[in-house]
Image (tube, rainbow, N blue to C red):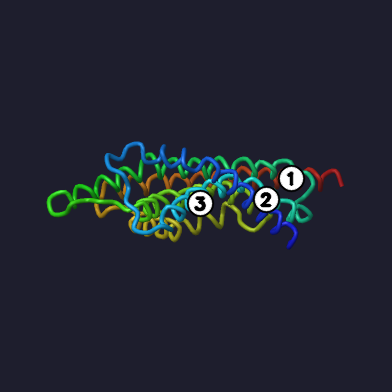
Amino acid sequence: MRARIIRTLIAFLVSMVAVFIYVRDIYQWLVRDIDQKLVVLGPSDVMWVYFMIAGVGAIAVTLPVAAYQTWKFVQPAVPEQAQRATLLFIPSITFLFLLGIGFGYFILFPMVLHFMNEIAADDFATMYTAEKYFTFMIHMTVPFGLLFEMPAIVMFLTKLGIVNPNKLAKGRKLAYFILVIIAVTITPPDILSDIIVIVPLFLLYEISITISKFVYRTQLKTQNALNANA
């Protein structure tokens, strides 16, 4: 376990250094739609912003490594016939993280930022600091990268026998309640914004249940076939 954690940390650090080499280009792309230059209040703010950007990029790059190390750790507990299918967990977790980041950045973040600007337009002169701007951006994107991992994690846990579609279906009301709280907490206080976030989260949960059903039925068929041959 310790060796796998160390490998993941090394991969993260190497990825962070690699992303940091191009961090200024990434920064310029992220602020391309802003009409004003972002403000820094101290000498260290610039490096803090660059490290935030590099850190998020390193997380995205390191996810496949972390997923692979996790899979290798639990591999002995996974039936041999299910191991190939479980490997789908590795590319899918990266794809879903990037999909969630994209949803947050291209849909949620501009919507919330526009809402905040509209509130401030009549009473305040807006001047963003680089640290506050990127902290806000990360809060609007990274949580969705993690939430979008739900189908892949459910698939993995179903393979391990920790969850099954019956448990997920019974816990639907509680799960919906938690997802609604999350959506309302991170969106502006208007019903349209809430719906834009709540609907994808509900769909993700239903997709997770469907995936769990497919994996669970496949496992039952395989087990029945083995028992019949025995």
Q: Is residue 29 left or right of residue 208?
A: left
Dot 2 or dot 1, earlier in sequence: 1
- Label 2 crowd (10 A; few <14 / some 14-19 / many >=20): many
Element under disc 2: helix
User: Which residue sits at x=69%, y=59%?
Assistant: 5
Amino acid residing under circle 3: Leu
Q: Is residue 104 visible?
A: yes
The answer to whether 153 appears left or right of 42 in the picture is: right
Name the residue: 27% across, 39% down: 35
Is 128 placed left or right of 7 in the picture?
Answer: left
Q: Which residue has dot 1 on it?
A: 82
Q: Residues within 10 Å of mark 1 (few under 14, many from 20)?
A: some
Is the N terminus in the top left, top right, bottom left or bottom right quadrant? Answer: bottom right
Is disc 2 in contact with disc 1, using a CB cutoff of under 8 Å?
Answer: yes
Amino acid tagged 1: Ala
Q: Nearer the viewer, mark 3 or mark 2?
A: 3
Q: Nearer the viewer, residue 10 or 221?
A: 10
Residue with the mark numbered 3: 146
User: Where in the figure is residue 201, as x and y percent of width and height?
Assistant: 43, 48
Q: Which residue is mark 2?
A: 159
- Give the residue at x 64% y 58%: 162
Find residue 103 and report its horizontal and vertical position in percent: 42, 42
For marks 3 and 2, give the CA distance.
20 Å
Instruction: Tell which of 188 and 84 is nearer to you.
Output: 188
Between discs 3 and 1, the one toward the N terminus: 1
Give the mark nearer the N terminus: 3 vs 2. Answer: 3
Query: What residue do we see at 44% from left, 44% from top?
Result: 203
Distance from label 3 to label 1 (Cα)? 25 Å
- Frontmost of labels 3 and 1 is 3
Q: Nearer the viewer, residue 155 or 45?
A: 45
